[in-house]
Image (spheres, rainbow, N blue to C red):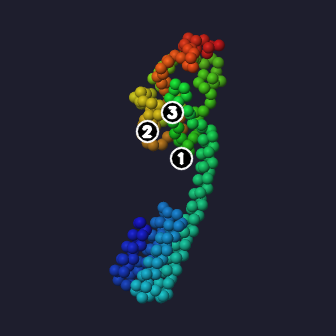
Amino acid sequence: MIPVVLIVVITVVDILVPADVHLGPLLVIASAITASFAGPLLTGVIEVLAVAAQAFFGWHFGVLFSRNVMVQVLALAVLSSLIVFFCVVRKQHRRRPAQVWSVAEAAQHALLWPLPDRPGPMQVACLYLAAEDEARIGGDLYAAPPLGLGSGPADCTLDLFSFEAGDTLLLYTDGVVEARDQDGIFYLFTERAAQWTDNTPETLLHHLRRDLLAHTGGRLDDDAALIAIRRMHTRHAGRHHGKPLPRASELRSWNQM
């Protein structure tokens, strides 16, 4: 509505000012403003209204077919046509990156499959924050093999922890713990995450996402991936498909084989 109101205001003011003052050339502003946020079609409509207003000035003062008014109408029409042309060119240039982004997004989804919400007695939620604009996925991925089945070094240290019902396992990449604010202070991930560990994995990651972006001012310098896994309470704790689960000592013996 701003370009339309501008055309009306210029028309009314031009009629009220003395006859030797001409504000018609200012009508091109309406077309320029429209082109800044609209496409060729709406810009063309506004430009038709602007040319019609310029012609109305000449008709109102009885000089529509004078040389001066005809030149002003023709000049406004030419400028308006150029503005529409540049709108068309801009639209075509924007369409090409959109196609590239669409292909890139399809490739990203092929690389990063969604995790199941409930694999067995677990609740799982994942969060991915890409540092680059217009990107869903960056260099960090949360796909590779089940925990403990990787091809790590043979002399690595193995730490065993119990994973009881109600416990939450939180996996993260360096983009989370190395995130800094404007003063260069690292994000206190352990302290911040501890206050939401009693929530569901989805709620936990929701709070972490909001808190992390607030710490960094809404933009990350590196990709950040998180996975929250919570073991749910079951009726038959310690049994799975009718068979008892292995004890921690048995798991230790199996991992050392």
Q: Position of residue 159 (x, y in %)?
A: 54, 17
Q: Secondary structure at mark 2?
A: helix
Nearest to viewer (mark 3 / mark 2): 3
The amino acid type, in three-letter code, at marker 1 is Asp
Residue labelled with disc 3: 125
Residue labelled with disc 2: 210
Q: CA distance from mark 1 to mark 3?
A: 23 Å
Residue labelled with disc 1: 133
Q: Is residue 153 left or right of residue 37?
A: right
How crowded pointer 1 is (Cα within 10 Å; few <14, some 14-19, many 20+) is rated as: few
Q: Position of residue 90 (x, y in %)?
A: 57, 62
Vertically, is 191 above or below 9?
above
Q: Which mark is residue 77?
A: none
Nearest to viewer (mark 1 / mark 2): 2
Q: CA distance from mark 3 to mark 2?
A: 15 Å
Q: Position of residue 21 (x, y in %)?
A: 38, 81
For the C terminus, give its image quadrant.
top right
The amino acid type, in three-letter code, at marker 3 is Ala
Q: Is residue 155 left or right of residue 229?
A: right
Image quadrant of residue 252?
top right
